[in-house]
Amino acid sequence: MELIVAVNNARRLEYHDRFALQQADQAIRKDMVRALVELITNSNDSYHRLEEAGIETDGLIIIEIQRKMKNGILRIRDYAEGMDADTMNQAVGTYGAPTSGFLEGQSVRGLWGRGLKDSFYGLGHGTVTSIKDDLFYQSRLFIEDGAPMYEPPGEAVPVTEKQRKQYQIPEGNGTVMEIILSRPDVPVPRVDTLRFKLQQHFELRTIMENPQRDITLRELKSSVSVKNEFPLGYRAPTGIRIYNEAFYVTGHPALVHLEVYRSDEPLTTVSDVGDFADGGLLVISRRVVMALTLLKYNHNDHASRVYGTITCDYLHDLLQKEETEPILTATRDGLNWDHPFMKELRSEVELRLDPLVQAERRLAQQTATRVVDQKLRKRFNSALKRLNSIASSVLSPARSGKKEKTRPDIPFNGFGFTKEFASVQSGRATTITLRAIASEMVRAGETSVVLSENREVSVLTPTVQMQPRKDFPDIIEAKVQVEGRQVGAESVVTAKANGHSAEALVRVTSRPKEEKSAPTGFITDLEFSPTADPRQRAVYDREAAKIIIATQSPSVAPYLSDGGAGANTPQGQVLLAEMVTDVICREIARVGVQSGKLPAFHEDMEASIQAHVVRLQHEFAHEIHAYFVDSQYRRKTVEEE
């Protein structure tokens, strides 16, 4: 029997009002950064449409935020196309339609036409104000009785000078999107956090890198008064290109350009920090970033230096076809890797990534420090215990009464940074301390000028004042703030005061510095490193409180290698004992003289340190040798006999 279905009463399915609000919450997730990604890309899309039409633009996008306990303000302003009433009704008053020119083949990101509405409803309510062809338009998005509402613009009227001044669009066209942050369940991030996340967010990466865009974040004191202003941007990590080829995906008319770089520094990955990772491959179609991924290597440590792009404009072709199985997830989270084409694309890219990641794995195995064998480790542990005892006896002699505060170390020449080497995470700021003894050299209240030789390491405090410490008034200090802008960049930061200068080398990293527990002794370990600078065969790492032996140093390599191999031979043991003696005696002398715990015999601090080095070597070298050199390799002294 043939089944007959009646269609006379058919009608379009009705959606409940709360559906739109649920969609907004699902898309924005009560996250201001996700909302700003949508709004910034809307402005960027508008500039792109003008540029593709051959119209020159200034690319200026201004983001303003006023943080308040209630009803804070978030505002995004551009000077692009502007919107008339018809455009505004379609772009702002319609939900779910592709309104940004995507279906017409333009290189824009507004793929589904619901990002702007989600942003407003997800954070609160607000207005969209636009000036186009000297006419003024304004619409409202708000929630009333639990329902999303849209108030369209009224009849077009000529824009007044007062309105141009109020919305800060002095001439031409432009749009201001203003959201009142009225939802109490949406946290408002600190401005420095917002700045970091906007610069790092992968979906904004090509916008932040675009020299034709000028993006500014402003922190407001009031609705119009600016407290702070920050330029936003992103620079790819320093590195070398290790792959650059184009290929077709089998069975599809899809040309893919894969460009892969190896960073000079380990990078944050998607598995570490999600959308804000420096590492990974950006999937780009017609200049629009759709995903950040390392595919099957997302959790592989050997891929932590990999970054680059997978460019495939065919993704836009698939989106325009509006297939039953979409290549984008329904929540705008990125690409649907279960789509048949995406599976093929994934397979082709992974095939080319595999030898690159395997090469990294082999390199890691070759350069990793080998584990010191158990017998040698036991010897080292005994030696370290005695070395700490020597340091303690020289620097902290036993005394009765109330325990005194430890006097801070003074830089070698009496004026300098407390750390000669410092690291700062890209997009973040860190503080390095400038310290001196108050004297004719540098007086309390003296102003120091601070400069960076590389613009990718920015000095946020170009002038600082040297102020006395409360606990040790004869010691003066200043806090210098620096910010990293490009992973892998290095810069010598120089401070100058009263004709004297101090330097610190600052390196920009992708990953935040790991917090380690404080060392339990003056020296905590002895490490054999094949990657340490071979120009110094043994050094004391003050930050890690350990002695590092450079096994590639020309005078070390013939006798000792990675993991302490060779330390069981007489020549290896004697060399090791000599290097440890030199390093530990010099470090004890330096700390002692600079802290005032050892007397300064000369006006020249270096001469005083060297005098104490000679004394300490004479007093303790034979003891150190006894720990590192087996008795059968040592001649007995008169005392031992």
Image: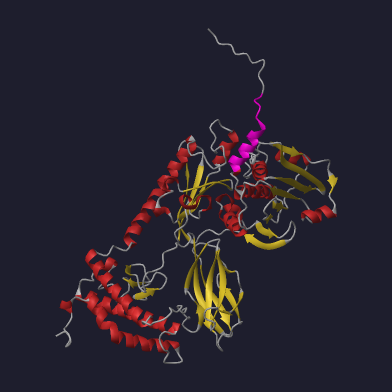
> Can residue 74 be spotted in the picture?
no
Taking depth in this image into account, of 337 and 564 the one nearest to the observer is 564
Q: Is residue 591 above or below residue 84?
A: below
User: In this view, which residue lies farthest toward the left?
Assistant: 641
Q: Is residue 182 above or below residue 628?
A: above
Majority secondary structure of the magenta segment? helix
Left or right: residue 384 compared with residue 634: right
Left or right: residue 597 compared with residue 156: left
**Coordinates of residue 195 in the picture (x, y in percent):** 60, 58
**Coordinates of residue 504 in the picture (x, y in percent):** 50, 74
Q: Which residues are magenta?
A: 12-27
**Coordinates of residue 110 in the picture (x, y in percent):** 63, 43
Which quarter of the rendered picture does the C terminus lie within? bottom left
Q: Residue at x 28, y 83 (%)?
A: 620
Q: Is residue 464 above or below residue 328?
A: below
Taking depth in this image into account, of 232 and 126 the one nearest to the observer is 126
> Can residue 261 be spotted in the picture?
yes
Q: Residue at x 46, y 57 (%)?
A: 267
User: In this view, which residue lies farthest toward the bottom?
Assistant: 602
**Coordinates of residue 56 in the picture (x, y in percent):** 71, 54
Q: How is the image coloured?
A: secondary structure
